[in-house]
Image: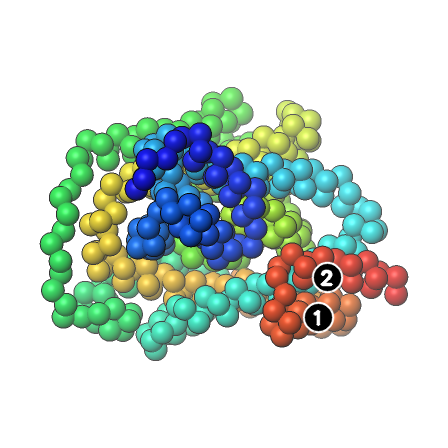
Amino acid sequence: MPNISLSNMTRVFARIGCLSFGGPAGQIALMHRELVDERQWVAEDEFLHALNFCHLLPGPEAQQLATYIGWKLHGARGGLIAGLLFVLPGAAVMLALSMLYVLAADLHWFQALFLGIKAAVLAIVVQALLRVAGKALGTRFKMMLAVLAFILIGVFALPFPLVVLGLGALGFIVAQTNPDWLGLASGQTQPDLPPRPPLANTVRSILVWGLVWALPLALVLVLLGPDHVLCDIGLFFSKLAVVTFGGAYAVLAYMAQQAVEGFQWLRPGEMADGLGLAETTPGPLIMVTQYVGFIAAFRTPDPFSPLIAGIAGAVLTTWVTFAPCFLWIFTFAPWVERLQHASRLKGALSAVTAAIVGVITNLALWFALHLLFTRSGGGQLGGLALPDLSSFDARAAAIAAIGALLIFRAHWGIMPVLAVSAALGLVASLF
């Protein structure tokens, strides 16, 4: 890579962090234009090589790609700067929006606004489902994994981490015995692997960044005890950070289930509100976790004021969500050349990606039921509460249909669709 000054790199990644709207596809395209096409800091094959590596890791791949490129340009310092600048603008905006949300949630106009946003979110989730399915389900075995994941989560209410890790382990095995089931090439001679990086450096990265990850949670445990809401927040989102394969949509169903039904931090419609807010901010979509952490702590603030507790919950959530990303990059980046040739690891990832289709389908169904029906009461199917059919909301259905037309037929971007849907929510509230 060329010799780029640290100050110049910092300015460019600050620009990327402020403009990174549109989910991972838009964010990756923005980095490609800035770093490959315009400045030629990164060669095309190096960029794709880095992107493939980041797809192997849990967490937001676009943020990890920024961290990895920063690491290639200026070592750990460059990776830290690039990764933080990708996250901080969106985190600041999300915190401000979360504060506005809790202060204005009881106002009629605000509720009407978010009726439209939630309807648009349903169309956006369906779009994400179709995109992931188109890329992930290339074989019948992968289709079977997607259906199996949907049944295990939606019908049998098995925990998301258990399903993803279990099907990933199955893919690991199948990659060795029947790689064609996963669309992997078989019978090819493996290229010579590059030399192993020093093991001491790897262990040092794990210890240092593991400590960085755990330190705030340890302070919460010591100062507030294991029963405090901040401890629940730190532990839950730390666990979520380890299993966030396939992007934010993949874990939203599990996060919504736990936040709404398990911990009872949020009401059902508020989860969709949070996703709508996250869609309007720069940075990774997984920033919706910050919104959940803010509201959870805001509503159980002792011994703090609600606002201070909410800010603490948001900061802790963001910390334990993104600190692991630096751990993965700084630990495994020196091994990236060897990891690219790990066929069984590719098989595990391929199986997980297929399973994610079933997970996102479950999420889309969960959102649809809570958007289109205002009450539950039709019984229970596994972990899914069935709706009271008499509570069908025709306004939400109409706005969702218009949002779908704008996305799938008119090919509008996310931001204009959200704006139009929000306006329609305000208009619908008049009738």
Residue 283, percent across and down? 53, 45
To which quarter of the image does residue 122 belong? bottom right
- List x then y, in percent, for residue 291: 61, 43
Characterize the local packing of mark 2: few (<14), some (14-19) or many (20 or more) Cα atoms within 10 angstroms.
many
Residue occupied by mark 1: 402
Q: Amino acid at mark 1?
A: Ile
Image height of 354 relative to 263, above or below: below
What element does badge 1 sit on? helix
The quarter of the picture where the N terminus appears is top left
Residue 226: percent from left, percent from top: 49, 31
Residue ID at (38%, 58%): 164
Locate the C terminus by quadrant: bottom right
SS at mark 2 in the image: helix
Could you tell me the amino acid type at mark 2?
Answer: Ser
Residue contact at pointers 2 and 1, CB within 8 angstroms: yes
In space, the residues marked 2 and 1 are separated at their CA atoms by: 8 Å
Image location of residue 146, percent across then percent down: 41, 69
- Examine the rendering and report whether any part of residue 260 can be seen: no
Residue 211 visible in image:
yes
Q: Residue furthest top?
A: 223
Image point (56%, 55%), residue name: 22
In-front residue for pair 39/82: 39
Q: Is residue 123 left or right of residue 174?
A: right
Q: Earlier in the sequence, mark 2 or mark 1?
A: 1
Q: Report the colour scheme.
A: rainbow
Q: Residue placed at 79% from the left, 56% from the top?
A: 112
Q: Residue at x 78, y 43 (%)?
A: 104
Residue 2 relative to residue 374: left or right: left
Disc 2 target residue: 421
